[in-house]
Structure formats: structure tokens, C-alpha cells
Amino acid sequence: MSIYLGLDTSNYTTSVAIYDSKTRTVTQSKKLLPVKAGEKGLRQSDAVFHHTVQLPEVLGKLDISGKDISGIGVSVRPRNVEGSYMPCFLCGEGTAQMFGQILGIPVHRTSHQMGHILAGLYSAGKLELLQGKFIAFHVSGGTTDCVLCEPDSELLVKVTPVSSSADLKAGQLIDRVGLMLGLQFPCGAELERIAMESTKKFQYRPVMKGMDCCLSGLENQCRKML
């Protein structure tokens, strides 16, 4: 039996998880970073501070004491491309490196985007897709990408960008519309709840530039409707 620890300190959530290879189960613990009412997001310095405070708390909820951990996986940057960097990921990387040195176990560094892709396959029960090529969509507050994924002996999955949003990202659009309505940031869950209560239907198409889309026009259309 092998147990693996995973850490991800993205811009808005402190996340840790344990994977048990014997039972093939994942146990997770996560907590959103606090954002002041009315604010549109967090400065990186604030995100780093909150991750530093929250990591011991979310790790404590996993109860990893006494467990024989075989390895650690950690997100160290947003995407696996040159120049992709955010200071908030240093919190998870530093914690993983510390555990690795103390326990004498390997630390495997990956990207936040790769975590989303693999988590999606695991949750959908479609890990067999890793054996061939497939298209993945990574839609979040900082990324709106369509990527081609294919097997790679070193990286496990080679990710090649196909298209993306040229301006606003989908998550940014959702949060900006939510803030227009007076919702608390991040607004996704509450905005979805409100939308599910409505019977109205709206059809708007984003502007396309080649394979890429532009979402800022949708923000302007939503503002005009208020």
C-alpha cells in the first residue's frame, strides 16, 4: 500500500489531499482564501500570507500523522509553459520540499493546470484517456484554455495549447458580473444558485479571433442589462 500527499496553493484556495493506492480513494481538505467584501480579488502578497496561515489548518484536517507517505505531488506554477509563474505557489512548493526532506521521500513538481486535467479524468472515471490523445478544457478565474493532451514518457501528459481567451477569463467574467449584483467574491457558487432559480434564457456569443475568444464583450452586455 502506498499513500501520496498532494498540495496546491492557487490564487484563491489552499488545497491538500491524500491518495491511497490500495483503495484508490482520495481524501481532500481545502479552504478558500479570504477576500474582503467588495474586492475583486487578492494581491499575491496577501495570497501568500493567507496560504501560510491556512496550510497547517487544512493539513491538520487530513490527519496524516502516522501515515507512511511514499511521495508528494505539488503544483509549482499555473501552467507548464515558460514564464508561467505566481508567487502563491511557492507556499505549497516550500511545504512539499520540507516534508520531502524530513521524510526522505520524492517530491514531484507539476502545474496547476495539469492538476485540473488529471483531477477531471479521475472524477469522471476516465483515466484510460491518458493512453491516447484527448482535448481538455481548463476554465477558471485565471485560465480559459482548450488544450491538446497526449501521452509523454517524462511529463505523463504533454499539453499543447489549442485556443484560449484573448482578454477576460471565464472566471473573471463570472466574478465581475457577480460583483455587479452585489455578491461576495468569489461569486461563482452564488451566481449559479441565482441562475438556477431563473426561467429566462439568454443567448450571447463571444467575439472570435481565429481560434481564440474574447469575453470582455459579454461583460459589457451584462452591464447594460442591469
Image (cartoon, rainbow, N blue to C red):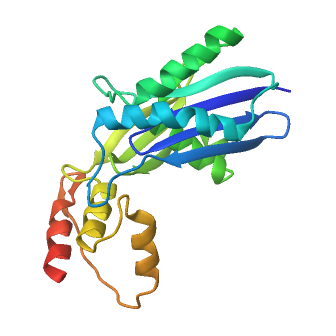
Kindly give the residue lying farthest to the bottom in the view shown.
Answer: 199
Query: Where residue 144 sits in the image (x, y, percent)?
Result: 33, 50
State left or right for residue 84 relative to residue 150.
left
Residue at 33% x, 37% y is 46
Q: Is residue 77 visible?
A: no
Query: Where residue 78 sits in the image (x, y, percent)?
Result: 38, 34
Most foreground residue, 114 or 16? 16
Most foreground residue, 34 or 163? 34
Residue at 46% x, 48% y is 136
- The answer to which quarter of the image holds residue 63 is top right
Query: Where residue 22 sits in the image (x, y, percent)?
Result: 85, 34
How many marks can you see?
0
State left or right for residue 194 relative to residue 42.
right
Query: Where residue 40 sits in the image (x, y, percent)?
Result: 26, 54
Quarter containing the C terminus:
bottom left
- The answer to which quarter of the image holds residue 106 is top right
Most foreground residue, 2 or 156? 2
Q: Is residue 36 visible?
A: yes
Q: Is residue 34 above or below residue 49?
A: below
Residue at 27% x, 66% y is 179
- The answer to which quarter of the image holds residue 37 is bottom left
State left or right for residue 221 relative to residue 39.
left
State left or right for residue 213 relative to residue 36.
left
Residue at 32% x, 54% y is 36
Most foreground residue, 212 or 141? 141
Quarter containing the N terminus:
top right
Q: Is residue 145 above or below residue 65?
A: below
